[in-house]
Image: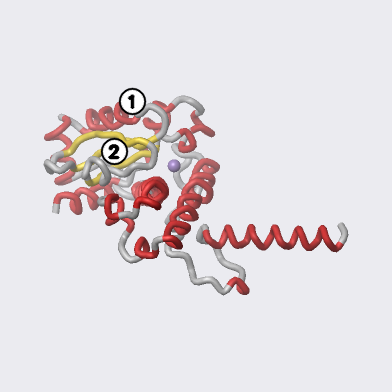
Amino acid sequence: MNRRQSLQLLASTASLAGAIGVAGRALPSHAQQKSPAFSLPPLGYAYDALEPHIDTATMGYHHKNHHNAFIGILNAQVEKFPDLATKPIEAFLSNLASVPEAVRTPVRNAGGGHWNHSFFWDLMAPGGAKAPTGDLKSAIEGTFGSVEKMKEAVNQAGMTRFGSGWAWLVVGKDKKLSAVNTPYQDTPHMDLGAKPILGVDVWEHAYYLKHQYRRADYLNAWWNTVNWDKAAANFRKATA
Ligand code: MN3
């Protein structure tokens, strides 16, 4: 390698380091940039903690790569519209009309992606309650007849989302539970004005390595990862 090639390599490494910095990783000490508004939330458990239901490789790519990509895009919008960093992103997702048109689509997609994945990681856990109890259990039985029927309804919502999106158990504007789906990275707050209790990513990247095209198998396996303590907390918040 001659001197010119070495300099080119250094320059491309520096710009790569900058790009990674924007995406929420450690910045090189000479970068002198303020820390980005959004950063990748830690999982709270190891990538292999949800085995055998969700495999280690999928968890790693999904968290470090897919989720982190949304953080980078979101931080790029903050550069153009700093107000995005002044409130929880939920406030903007619930009222997309308040987001300037120039950044509305990336905020919808990347802000939604960041919110959905953060919610999803928190909802899954190797510990926690294995089934709903108390008020959430009563509400599920009142609406669906049984916990099993509710799972079938959420699975159905996931199976009928053509292409990429999410399936949810939500509390709607009418304060009732229902199973719904959203396209792409739309959150239940957006068009539905609903509050999520449970949510499952049905993009192929969430299951393809282990289950290939078998979305139904993934959905059935996923229920084993749900932390019902967290779902109960979501329900309390949604119905408060
Ligand atoms: Mn995903």
Of the pair 155 and 26, the residue shown nearer to us: 26
Q: Can see residue 223?
A: no
Q: Name the secondary structure under disc 2.
A: strand
Q: Which residue is mark 2?
A: 168
- Residue 175 placement, left or right of 161: left
Q: Amino acid at mark 1?
A: Thr
Q: What is the crowding at mark 2: few (fewer than 14 residues within 10 Å), some, or many (at least 20)?
A: many
Q: Residue at x 44, y 44 (%)?
A: 50
Q: Name the secondary structure under disc 1.
A: loop
Query: Image quadrant for the N terminus?
Result: bottom right
Q: Quadrant of residue 188?
A: top left
Q: Residue at x 42, y 28 (%)?
A: 215
Up-down: is 238 above or below 216? below
Q: Quadrant of residue 139?
A: top left
- Distance from label 2 to label 1 (Cα)? 12 Å
Label for residue 174?
A: none
Of the pair 34 and 26, the residue shown nearer to us: 34
Up-down: is 100 above or below 223? below
Residue furthest toward the front? Answer: 102
Q: Quadrant of residue 5?
A: bottom right
Q: Residue at x 15, y 34 (%)?
A: 141
N-terminal-most mark, 2 or 1: 1
Up-down: is 175 above or below 153? below
- Residue 70 placement, left or right of 98: right
Q: Amino acid at mark 2?
A: Trp
- Residue 56 placement, left or right of 163: right
Q: Residue at x 34, y 42 (%)?
A: 186
Q: Which residue is mark 1?
A: 160
> Ligand 1 shows up in which quadrant of the image?
top left
Up-down: is 47 above or below 4? above
